[in-house]
Image: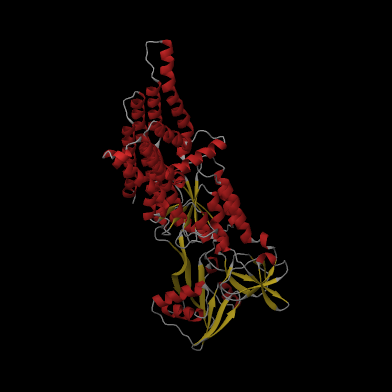
């Protein structure tokens, strides 16, 4: 409410003044008293516009909506129509506040991108742990990163092996095992143990800093959309101002040529000022922001957050949609998809053996197996001895039997035969052998979101047939997903730089308008670069949400087609409002120039158009589901 205090003060003073004038209160009738009263009503909303007009003149920009508003208000006060001068500024101020409110609401509770960078690094110096700022750590020094912490600097792995969550950099859904001597990048998260890394690059050249720079560069390439009303006013303002001058000038010239024509300066000046006041695009100024605000409100109720009215326009022009995979089309959560059993064992036996051995691990795959066993109501054995075989899996003795659980390399290491082609399976598999015999495996995969297929089909119904997938996951996984969804083009094994390069290549076609849909830090640069960046807001990273133009709060890819429909409906209704405002304005302008229309008739026309604009804005929310 505080945000609208100026408009409220102005409205109360305006309505009170009109009421006192209507009942003909004697003390209010002198012109000087009325002038002061309405001047007090004018200042809260008019002073900021007059200030903007003054700044525009100083910047040698003479024709914009600020100048037109100022001329109209000053003209209204000059001819003694003080209420109209106040109403002009009041309508304009409210329209601007609506637009600002929509943007402010969309950006609230969104963190800045820089918050994702680790603020400290634990450096091993002379055998002691020293907490230091990452930018002060030198190349060649050793840093220690605990489980769950983010790596602050690029370096080389010193331990035997550890699992890292690389989704922030590559979008890869499967945690990556990095062995001794392997490259560890800033932004990765250690998932299972304390590791030590020898720093290979200074802070400003790390992977995470490189992503931040890409975001900055991409943001600079995206010019902000200019509001239609400002473009319109650059032409409209000088035209109507010139016409107002001609309304006075032409009759004077006629009176000079034909002395019989009686020219009264005050009468024609009054008509010119009425014309100028009538020409003020109050209805346009109100209807355009209100239309966008209605579209933003309708989208918000459907779980779609537009960060500004310009993106409602931009999304209607999209003809290419590029998806990230993990967390966007998929849930980013492992689930057991298939159970294979051999050698006389049952599904329950295999699940029980694998879940029992994996129960000692915090690896995401192990947790997925545990959840699956629990859902099948299969109990696990707790009292077992487990030995980790780095890079291969686990070895355990359970109920007098030797059990091996891990990848196919584990079976190869122990010379255990397994089905041909198992090592080439694109999805994650957990194999199991008991007493040297392969008994089965579990196949796990990132789960597809329920509406992913529907999302692709809905986009195609909107005549968007260029749909692509870009992902850091294996090409085989990405291709299989694309085939199922009906997406013709899919690229895997990509780093953030690769995604940026791909979208840049798409944008070289001047007729192509690209929307990118993602959810991770690794998606932030390409979200900023695309014509419309769309982030999954429910579980998406703060960086992606901050950079994106549109946020899907429900994490449903199917809402992208809905967002496009909201944009198209909003644009259609706004142009209805513009056409209506122009039609009404033209009629009243002609009547005003002819001396037929009065000031208040113009006010009522503006109010009527504004009311219709409000009703149209409400219709947006009802028409889009």
Residue 553 location in percent, x, y?
A: 42, 58
Residue 470 location in percent, x, y?
A: 53, 55
Vertical arrangement, residue 84 with respect to residue 409, above or below: above
Residue at 33% from the left image edge and 28% from the top image edge:
587
Q: Quadrant of the N terminus?
A: bottom left
Instruction: Look at the image and tell me whether residue 131 can be seen.
Output: yes
Q: Is residue 287 left or right of residue 156?
A: left
Vertical arrangement, residue 335 with respect to residue 79, above or below: below
Residue at 49% from the left image edge and 80% from the top image edge:
359
Residue at 43% from the left image edge and 12% from the top image edge:
256
Residue 598 location in percent, x, y?
A: 32, 30
Residue at 33% from the left image edge and 44% from the top image edge:
614
Of 455 and 299, nearer the camera is 299
Of 257 and 36, nearer the camera is 36
Residue 257 location in percent, x, y?
A: 43, 11
Which residue is at the far front? 27
């Amino acid at each position: 409410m505080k945000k609208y205090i100026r408009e409220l003060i102005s409205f109360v003073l305006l309505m009170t003044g009109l009421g006192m004038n209507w009942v003909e209160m004697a003390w209010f009738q002198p012109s000087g008293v009325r002038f002061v009263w309405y001047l007090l009503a004018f200042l809260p909303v008019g002073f900021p516009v007059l200030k903007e007009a003054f700044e525009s003149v100083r910047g040698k920009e003479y024709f914009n909506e600020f100048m037109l508003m100022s001329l109209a208000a000053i003209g209204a006060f000059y001819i003694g129509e003080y209420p109209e001068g106040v109403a002009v500024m009041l309508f304009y101020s409210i329209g601007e506040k609506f637009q600002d409110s929509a943007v402010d609401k969309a950006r609230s509770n969104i963190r800045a991108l820089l918050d994702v960078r680790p603020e400290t690094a634990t450096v091993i110096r002379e055998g002691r742990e020293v907490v230091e700022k990452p930018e002060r750590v030198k190349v060649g020094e050793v840093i220690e990163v605990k489980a769950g912490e983010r790596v602050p600097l690029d370096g080389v792995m010193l331990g035997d092996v550890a699992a890292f969550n690389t989704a922030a950099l590559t979008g890869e859904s499967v945690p990556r095992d990095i062995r001794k001597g392997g490259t560890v990048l800033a932004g990765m998260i250690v998932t299972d143990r304390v590791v030590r890394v020898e720093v290979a690059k200074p802070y400003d050249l790390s992977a995470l800093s490189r992503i931040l720079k890409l975001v900055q560069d991409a943001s600079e390439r995206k010019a902000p959309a200019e509001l239609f009303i400002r473009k319109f006013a650059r032409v409209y303002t000088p035209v109507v101002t010139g016409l107002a001058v001609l309304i006075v000038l032409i009759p004077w010239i006629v009176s000079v040529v034909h002395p019989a024509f009686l020219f009264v300066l005050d009468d024609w000046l009054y008509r010119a000022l009425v014309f100028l006041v009538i020409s003020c695009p109050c209805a346009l100024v109100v209807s355009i922001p209100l239309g966008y605000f209605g579209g933003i409100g309708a989208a918000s109720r459907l779980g779609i957050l537009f960060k500004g009215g310009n993106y409602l326009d931009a999304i209607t022009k999209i003809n290419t949609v590029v998806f990230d995979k993990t967390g966007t089309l998929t849930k980013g959560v492992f689930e057991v998809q298939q159970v294979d059993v051999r050698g006389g064992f049952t599904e329950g036996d295999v699940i029980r053996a694998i879940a029992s051995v994996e129960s000692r691990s915090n690896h995401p795959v192990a947790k997925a197996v545990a959840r699956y066993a629990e859902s099948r109501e299969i109990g696990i054995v707790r009292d077992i001895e487990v030995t980790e075989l780095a890079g291969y899996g686990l070895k355990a003795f359970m109920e007098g039997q030797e059990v091996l659980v891990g990848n196919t390399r584990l079976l190869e290491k122990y010379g255990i035969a397994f089905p041909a082609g198992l090592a080439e399976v694109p999805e994650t598999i957990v194999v199991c052998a008991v007493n040297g015999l392969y008994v089965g495996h579990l196949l796990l995969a990132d789960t597809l979101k329920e509406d992913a297929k529907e999302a692709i089909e809905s986009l195609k119904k909107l005549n968007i047939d260029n749909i692509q997938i870009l992902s850091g996951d294996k090409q085989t996984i990405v291709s299989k997903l694309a085939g199922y969804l009906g997406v013709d083009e899919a690229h895997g094994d990509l780093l953030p730089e690769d995604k940026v390069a791909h979208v840049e290549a798409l944008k070289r076609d001047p007729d192509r308008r690209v929307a990118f849909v993602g959810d991770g830090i690794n998606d932030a640069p390409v979200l900023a670069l695309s014509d419309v960046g769309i982030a999954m807001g429910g579980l998406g990273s703060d960086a992606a949400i901050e950079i994106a133009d549109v946020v899907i709060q429900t994490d449903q890819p199917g809402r992208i087609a809905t967002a496009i429909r909201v944009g198209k409906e909003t644009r259609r209704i706004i142009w209805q409002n513009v056409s209506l405002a122009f039609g009404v304005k033209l009629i009243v302008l002609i009547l005003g120039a002819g001396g037929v229309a009065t000031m208040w008739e113009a006010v009522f026309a503006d109010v009527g158009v504004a009311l219709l604009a409000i009703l149209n804005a409400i219709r947006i929310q009802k028409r889009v589901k």
